[in-house]
Image (cartoon, rainbow, N blue to C red):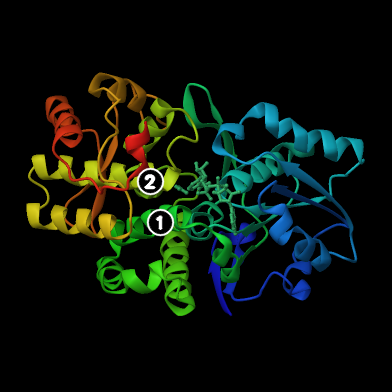
Amino acid sequence: MKTLQVDLGARSYPIYIGQALLGQAALIKEHVKGRQVQVVTNKTVAPLYLEKTLAAFADFQTDKVILPDGEKYKNLKVLNKIFNTLLRQRFDRQTTLVALGGGVVGDMAGFAAACYQRGVPFIQIPTTLLAQVDSSVGGKTGVNHRLGKNMIGAFHQPQCVLIDINTLQTLDDRQLSAGLAEVIKYGLINDLEFFYWLESHADELLARDAQALSFAIARSCQDKGQIVAEDERESGRRALLNLGHTFGHAIETGLGYGRILHGEAVAIGMCLAAQFSMRLGWIDEADVSRLIALIEKMALPTRIPKRLKVEQMLKLMQVDKKVREGKIRLVLLQGLGNAITTDQYDPQLLRQTLAAAKLSARQTTWWPMQLF
Ligand code: NAD
Ligand code: GLY
């Protein structure tokens, strides 16, 4: 097992990464403050991992909330299910919430923990690759609003993150690839060596080789943890973690939550960020092609779904937490491994980038976007 630390002073916490960690009660029990534990999961994950998780908390008063599965349920109405259970069962202020599932469950359980009785502790047990490399680390929690993704939320750090990579064996291929999009993101932001490693280990990752997965997860968590430690509340550097997200969130919202996976939308967004950076003269065409090739290799999409119009995309991109005084700030690339945040660009070039990405980018034949 590897243990990493997110350094946030009094709010510091460990990330445990290894195989068969779910059954290891001693590991998580020390992070439970009171006697009450509420496990939040969903209909898909519960039959797979809930029993094992509850067994680890055998000495505590436990209960569970099983949410419906899907991005379209990541909203305030469904969040209330968690509060209803907590209140009905008289869970007190010492309760620890445990998020068992992907990023949707993690974001919702974390947000419930941030709000319940003005804040109770929580533990992240992420079971998708995306949640293991990104959403479970860093304390961003929240839900979607009809008008914008992740627009209602809070910063609330977990007590610990427990990553059992064996849980990835039950994940379907499309979800695995979605997680790999966020992994590539770290290489692009500031870890060129990792980007090169990903190019040469793509096959092992897609084949779910435990060693390769473990390395990629640990490196991603380390990269993210460092940025979060520097800028917990995103007043500066943390915005880099949103590479591809302003485009991606617009695609997710535009298509309707759940039509495209978050990681898939981010993959397209990273291609757009690179293509726009190329128009601005900041990155070579060869490097953009190299990025697109890696994203395609990971079985991810690279272009905007046909039905989204350029003007619609631009309008949706305005609903972004990085917007200041109406100007869309974007994370762009000054070469591979060097991301920056800027609002200094010609909006016409942005329009042209979006238009070209719809018309010219390559597309794999199996891509489910064709269904839309
Ligand atoms: P998800 O939570 O919807 O999980 C994907 C699917 O996999 C779901 O159907 C889920 O039930 C299923 N699943 C989960 N674990 C499984 C397992 N081990 N075996 C089989 N099936 C399993 O999606 P996600 O990609 O994990 O997370 C996406 C969400 O995370 C988005 O809402 C996004 O906004 C959010 N996010 C948050 C942050 C953050 O910093 N808080 C960062 C990135 C993404
Ligand atoms: N996923 C972006 C962040 O955690 O800041």
Sequence-earlier tag: 1 or 2: 1
Q: Is residue 287 left or right of residue 196?
A: left
Q: Is residue 1 left or right of residue 294?
A: right
Quadrant occupied by the C terminus: top left
Neighbourhood count class around disc 1 (C-alpha, 10 Å): few under 14, some 14–19, many 20 upward:
many
Q: Splitting the image into 4 quarters, where does residue 195 fall?
A: bottom left
> Mark 1 is on which residue type?
Ser
Picture coordinates of residue 143, whole percent (x, y): 58, 34
Q: Nearer the viewer, residue 26 or 265?
A: 265
> Mark 2 is on which residue type?
Glu
- Vertical order, 116 against 288 (above or below): above
**Residue underneath mark 1:** 177
Q: Does the image show residue 312?
A: yes
Query: Residue at position x 52%, y 22% from top?
Result: 146
**Residue underneath mark 2:** 264
Picture coordinates of residue 55, whole percent (x, y): 83, 66
**Circle 2 sits in a helix, a strand or a loop, which is it?**
helix
Neighbourhood count class around disc 2 (C-alpha, 10 Å): few under 14, some 14–19, many 20 upward:
many
Q: Splitting the image into 4 quarters, where does residue 245 fall?
A: top left
**Circle 1 sits in a helix, a strand or a loop, which is it?**
helix
Picture coordinates of residue 5, whole percent (x, y): 55, 69
Q: Nearer the viewer, residue 18 or 372?
A: 372
Query: Residue at position x 88%, y 66% from top?
Result: 58
Q: Does the image show residue 322?
A: no
Query: Residue at position x 42%, y 64% from top?
Result: 220
Picture coordinates of residue 173, whole percent (x, y): 45, 58
- Vertical order, 222 against 246 (above or below): below
Q: Are marks 1 and 2 in contact (CB under 8 Å)?
A: yes
